[in-house]
Image: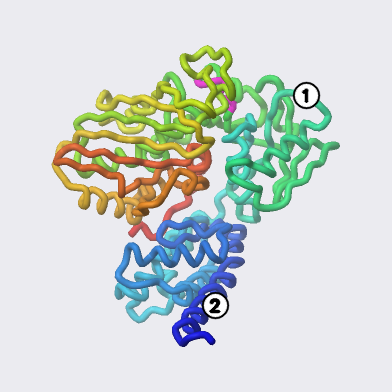
Amino acid sequence: MTSHLEEKYQASWQERQTFAENMQPIIGQLFRNKGIEISVYGRPLLNASPIDIIKAHKSVALHEDNKLRLRESFPFVEALNSMTLAPARIDIGKLAYSYLYQGQANDLSIEQYLEKQLTAISRENIDQESQDVVLYGFGRIGRLLARLLIEQTGPNAKLNLRAIVLRPSKGDDDLEKRASLLRRDSVHGAFNGSITTDSENNVIKANGAFIKVIYAKSPSEVDYTAHGINNALVVDNTGIWSDEDGLGQHLQSKGVAKVLLTAPAKGDIKNIVYGVNQDMILPEDKIVSAASCTTNAITPVLKAINDKFGIKNGHVETVHSYTNDQNLIDNYHKAPRRGRSAPLNMVISTTGAAKAVSKALPELKGLLTGNAIRVPTPNVSMAIMNLNLKAETDKTALNDYLRQISLDSELQNQVDYTASTEIVSTDLVGSRYAGVVDSQATIVDGDRAVLYVWYDNEFGYSCQVVRVMLEMAGITVPTLPLK
């Protein structure tokens, strides 16, 4: 026989689960039909399970004095679905909490309150034209970018994945093998949807996306206009070229307007860390770099620290998962140490990420050193930042500041924050943030601070790349509310 407390808990759980199940399809419709990404206190709800939606609401109590119940936020999601809105990232948790608990209602209905809060996206940028996208290369980053772009497929999609360019086929089953690698991933799991191939037309069809697969030895062989692709943004994730001469080859192909490199660039090419220096991208820029995964992970946190406390100097040590550049078993490699078996060894290596920070944050030029250790994990890395500050602080104050940065700043899509004492690297697989501050590991001694920042060096970086793509295409997707 169940007790009163058991019955009460079970009834409460059933109510939460029902609201989450009802919320789930509306969240999907908002994204596909309007380009609206819903979150709760920074926790993305797109493609989230009902349990994930419940857990996101539970996390509100970590930041506020009151709980936010699903029955309280559900009317806000319903109201958004009936509004005319331009693409945006909307934190329904913050909006609902402000309305219900912080005196922001002012006798307004939920609909009137949302109209007032979302004025910027209810009247502007609704008719922004979509951008044709081509992925040049289809390795780890290329396939994750494909997943993210396919996720956006719908009538209001602003980035349309039109084609993938590969080296010439080595067999009759090449197309199906490429589709299979997109369909299944040992690290990131199964693709969320349906993928089929059309070998006659060299096409991969995925969740409504119709993706032409083009085989070519070099950019000069491709005429994108022959495939109905015009003014395309080519995302080069091959790692073959990193300078203007090499990447400029893409611009010679018919149908190409701009090029984005998913690696650090050489020369005068702008290295962009979204959230920090994307305003450097000008309409006339033809070639841009999205920098490296590590540079994207550390630069937003370094900017936040420098803005508040100032940085005299420091060292960044990267504990990085192994990559395809290393050998599975001992074999010749042109780089020192990387020839030794990646799954069996920690391998000291080099990284230019610390120096590359200055390309996005010039005020830190010459202040940081860096090194790297490749470790036997397939994904998720960590940056350990040992910083000498210009102002003294303590662990509580520094962590509180970074927590607020993750919630209420222009870096809220780049910097995440965890207070978990149990979190390990696999818990961060699939994180959409550039970096995650592990507050429990923070060390502060006066003007010296050591910060530990996790990052999914594959998926989190790919999310940053997509943000740069939108900026290059002139597509505005604001995050609301900022506070």
- Type of amino acid at the residue the image marks with label 1: Lys
Q: Which quadrant does the C terminus fall into? A: bottom left
Instruction: Judge whether residue 239 is colored magenta.
Output: yes
Rendering coords of residue 387 (x, y %): 24, 34
Out of 423 and 361, give the one closest to the viewer.
423
In this picture, residue 399 sits left or right of residue 151? left
Give the magenta-colored segment's residue range.
238-242
In this picture, residue 46 sits left or right of residue 349? right
Give the quadrant of residue 234.
top right
In the displayed structure, would residue 451 be above or below residue 27? above
- Residue under circle 2? 14
Residue 248: tell me if it is visible: no
Mark 2 neighbour class, 10 Å CA radius: few under 14, some 14 to 19, many 20 or more: few
Give the quadrant of residue 147.
top right
Rendering coords of residue 117 (x, y %): 39, 66
Q: Which quadrant does the N terminus fall into? A: bottom right
Q: Which of the two discs, 1 and 2, labels the residue nearer the N terminus?
A: 2
Observer-side mark, 1 or 2, equals 2
Tag of residue 254: none
Rendering coords of residue 276 (x, y %): 36, 40
- Residue under circle 1? 170
Give the mark count: 2
Rendering coords of residue 444 (x, y %): 20, 42
Q: Residue at x 47, y 83 (%)?
A: 8
In the displayed structure, would residue 254 be above or below residue 122? above
In this picture, residue 33 sits left or right of residue 91? right
